[in-house]
Image (cartoon, rainbow, N blue to C red):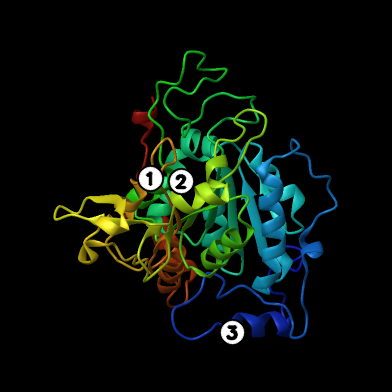
């Protein structure tokens, strides 16, 4: 393939080179080095919709998420050939087929590893990972936590439906204790992962939670994740109408949601209706009626706090019955990304001219050894 087909700047491609140089001053954004569209050019949702038939079960939450992403991508103003979606295995992993960008339907649990390679070698790409609770937190758990720990410039969308859907209804790493499934006919014995807590424990620099059916909230979170430079983990509550239908219904009912969803807005009190989150002297957070709360102990959300402890404490307010569910951006801090540091390290190693003599000295240096005839015998 040619450089243009691969989405690389071709020699003399002035528009591309100009867009690469036009990064804004101040903290770099997640898309700072990605080529933008020529002035006056805009894209629409249709431009990001492929010619492939979308095939999920009727009522699947993936339809809503796909529509939101296709509608959001034009906002970035990026060239389609410089956007990549990498997926693993699962229902959500069909995403690359339905987006008219570059993409890869990879292997089970390994999407973060493949995406890390892309982000590290191609600064001109906006790299996204689409995964599910089984793909990311079971076989892919190790790859996920290390991508977050390293702070690779990736946007990881984790669709959580608390079930294995593609393989027809086995319990997953986020299924609740006691849940009856095809692989747990007497109820699951496993304590589930909390994806947000896991990401914060790995010290991810951006962690958020949203829901498939809340288009405005989902889009706002995607926008913030795209702007963030570093690893962004976005958990998306997603309904599986066949094997775990209605698991998040109480959060979709307007009246119920008002009393259950703890809205996370930077600089504002963490509250759900007439209930607020307070912190005691030991740092433990609880939810109490506003009328009973000490105003001095009401938690004011700070997404940019360097210490992730408060964000982690908020994530632990979850309960299996969804009585209280924090929703929004838990953490959004700036620190050096793995891929930026790697590029700097490689550039610093490329100082001076490398000659044939340098190569010969390297090959015949102290780290080489010789096998004698006696040793071979």
Q: Which mark is residue 198?
A: 1
Residue 116 left/right relative to 371: right
Q: Is residue 308 above or below residue 143?
A: below
Q: Are marks 3 and 1 in contact (CB under 8 Å)?
A: no
Q: Quadrant of residue 280?
A: bottom left
Residue drawn at x 43%, y 71% as measured from the top left = 344
- Tell me which label, 1 or 2, sits earlier in the chain: 2
For the residues marked 3 and 1, what is the alpha-carbon distance in whole angstroms? 37 Å
Q: Secondary structure at mark 3?
A: helix
Which mark is in front, 3 or 1?
1
Q: Residue furthest front?
A: 291
Instruction: Note whether 262 is above or below 74 in the view shown.
Output: above
From the viewer's side, name the closer residue of 329 and 288: 288
Q: Earlier in the sequence, mark 3 or mark 2?
A: 3
Nearer to us in this view, 301 or 4: 301
Q: Which residue is mark 3?
A: 21
């Amino acid at each position: 393939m040619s450089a243009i087909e691969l989405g690389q700047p071709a020699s003399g491609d002035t528009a591309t080179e100009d867009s690469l140089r036009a990064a804004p001053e101040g903290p770099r954004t997640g898309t700072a080095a990605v080529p933008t569209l020529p002035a006056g050019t805009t894209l629409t949702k249709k431009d990001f919709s492929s010619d492939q038939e979308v095939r999920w079960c009727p009522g699947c939450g993936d339809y809503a998420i796909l529509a939101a992403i296709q509608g959001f991508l034009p906002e970035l103003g990026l060239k389609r050939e410089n956007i990549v979606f990498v997926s693993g295995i699962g229902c959500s992993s069909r995403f690359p087929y339905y987006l008219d960008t570059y993409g890869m339907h990879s292997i089970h649990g390994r999407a973060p590893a493949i995406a890390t390679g892309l982000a590290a070698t191609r600064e001109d790409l906006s790299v996204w990972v689409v995964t599910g609770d089984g793909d990311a937190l079971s076989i892919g758990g190790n790859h996920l936590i290390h991508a977050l720990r390293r702070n690779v410039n990736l946007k990881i969308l984790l669709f959580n439906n608390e079930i294995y859907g593609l393989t027809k209804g086995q319990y997953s790493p986020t299924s609740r204790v006691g849940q009856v499934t095809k692989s747990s006919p007497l109820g699951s014995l496993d304590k589930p992962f909390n994806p947000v807590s896991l990401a914060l424990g790995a010290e991810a620099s951006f962690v958020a939670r949203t829901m498939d059916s809340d288009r405005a909230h989902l889009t706002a979170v995607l926008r913030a994740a795209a702007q963030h430079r570093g690893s962004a983990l976005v958990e998306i509550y997603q309904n599986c109408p066949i094997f775990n239908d209605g698991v998040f219904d109480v959060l979709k009912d307007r009246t119920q949601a008002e009393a259950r969803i703890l809205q996370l807005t930077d600089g504002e009190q963490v509250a759900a209706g007439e209930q607020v989150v307070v912190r005691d002297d030991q740092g433990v957070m609880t939810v109490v009626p506003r009328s009973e709360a000490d105003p001095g102990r009401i938690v004011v959300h700070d997404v940019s706090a360097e210490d992730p402890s408060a964000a982690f404490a908020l994530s632990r307010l979850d309960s299996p019955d969804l009585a209280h569910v924090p929703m929004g951006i838990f953490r959004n801090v700036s620190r050096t990304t793995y891929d930026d540091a790697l590029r700097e390290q490689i550039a610093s190693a490329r100082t001076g001219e490398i000659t044939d003599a340098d190569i010969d000295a390297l090959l015949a240096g102290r780290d080489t050894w010789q096998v004698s005839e006696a040793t071979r015998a």
